[in-house]
Image (spheres, rainbow, N blue to C red):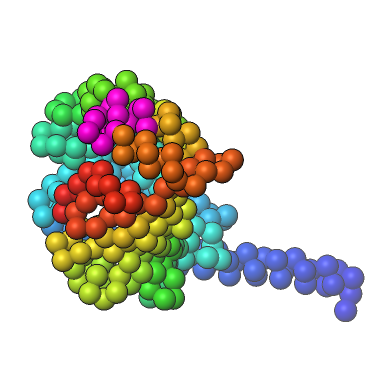
Amino acid sequence: MTMKTKLLWPIAAIIGLFVLYSAYWIIASGQIRKGVNEWIADKENAGYTIEHAGLHIGGYPYRFQIRLVEPHFRAPQSDGGWDARLQELSANAMPHDLSHWIVAFGGPLLLEDYASEDSVIEVTGSDARISLVYSVTGETERVGAEFRDLVVTTRAGTPPDIRSIDELLMSGVVDEDDGLRMRLAVSGVRAAPGVLEPDVERAFGDTARTARVNLEVTHWSALADGANAIAWRDAGGALQIADAELEWGPAHITGNGDFTIDSLARPDGRLSLRITDPDTLADALIEAGVVPRENEQALRLAAMMAPRSAEGVALPFRIHDGGIYLGPVRLGAIDG
């Protein structure tokens, strides 16, 4: 074999691999386009209306990218009847793993008839992405979301309860034991003007600094299938809060708990809270009218008698028969 032939073999191999990869990309992109069109058709058969100014498959050679230009979604009345528009909706996947897609939202999101009938709101943000991981059967296995600098502007109708969110992070996965494990963390949540009662806003302010929760829903399929809460309970379903945290005004609370529902679909279970500064929080709760004045002394006595540490006071709550109890004291009610 001559030196020239030895040099040609690697070049020919590279060219061959390039041709094979290009053929794979072209075939796969055609299947992706077909899959998107089938998904749109399935949604339209279910009563949705989906319009767009163009469907583009690109990203060659580094990735697969789906782009819907100016998508417009309208839901049937059975699903809320909302109407959503975007400048662009894109989804990206690496060529070696088409089970994992990153969905990005381009431009402001315009929502109609969502917060209330005849309402029109605009949602903007500096970053808005959703991560989706699918199983070999096409079912969603894992979901993640990142939203930053979200601002809600009301163009018409009743404004939503939230004005803006600095950051929202979420992840969820359904495990092999049919449990939904989810983590949610938000920061800088600002209430819209007039949403909070004046006493509540005066005591706590209009912005929650941090809220996070790490939870698991057992027997998830029983709840997801038709969202029948009673059937979920009968299957042994429960909500387990591994840890949670809230920072809002004078409130800095961490906790955990376990819940199910009773025969009237009301929460039933326990909630253990640790409050960093219980005396200041008690003042705020009473000022805001959350705890009735007649229960003021009972609340302060329970806080005083509760075990204290450097981290604060531990309070064991019980939710039963539609009531919220701290020890033997009924603090309020929960509607079913």
The magenta segment is: 282-296
Rendered location of residue 310, percent (x, y): 59, 40
Is residue 46 found left or right of 11 in the rendered image? Answer: left
Residue 267 belongs to the span the image colors magenta? no
Number of numbered tags placed on the structure image? 0
Q: Nearer the viewer, residue 203 or 109?
A: 203
Q: Nearer the viewer, residue 303 or 95?
A: 303
Rendered location of residue 122, percent (x, y): 27, 31
Query: Which residue is at a point 33% across and 43% down the rendered structure image?
Result: 69
Query: Which residue is at a point 32% across and 31% down the rendered structure image?
Result: 285
Q: Is residue 29 above or below residue 16?
A: above
Q: What predominant SS class does the magenta segment belong to?
A: helix
Residue 292 belongs to the span the image colors magenta? yes
Rendered location of residue 244, percent (x, y): 45, 49
Is residue 119 found left or right of 283 in the rendered image? Answer: left
Q: Is residue 48 above or below residue 124?
A: below
Query: Which residue is at a point 44% across and 71% down the rendered structure image?
Result: 175
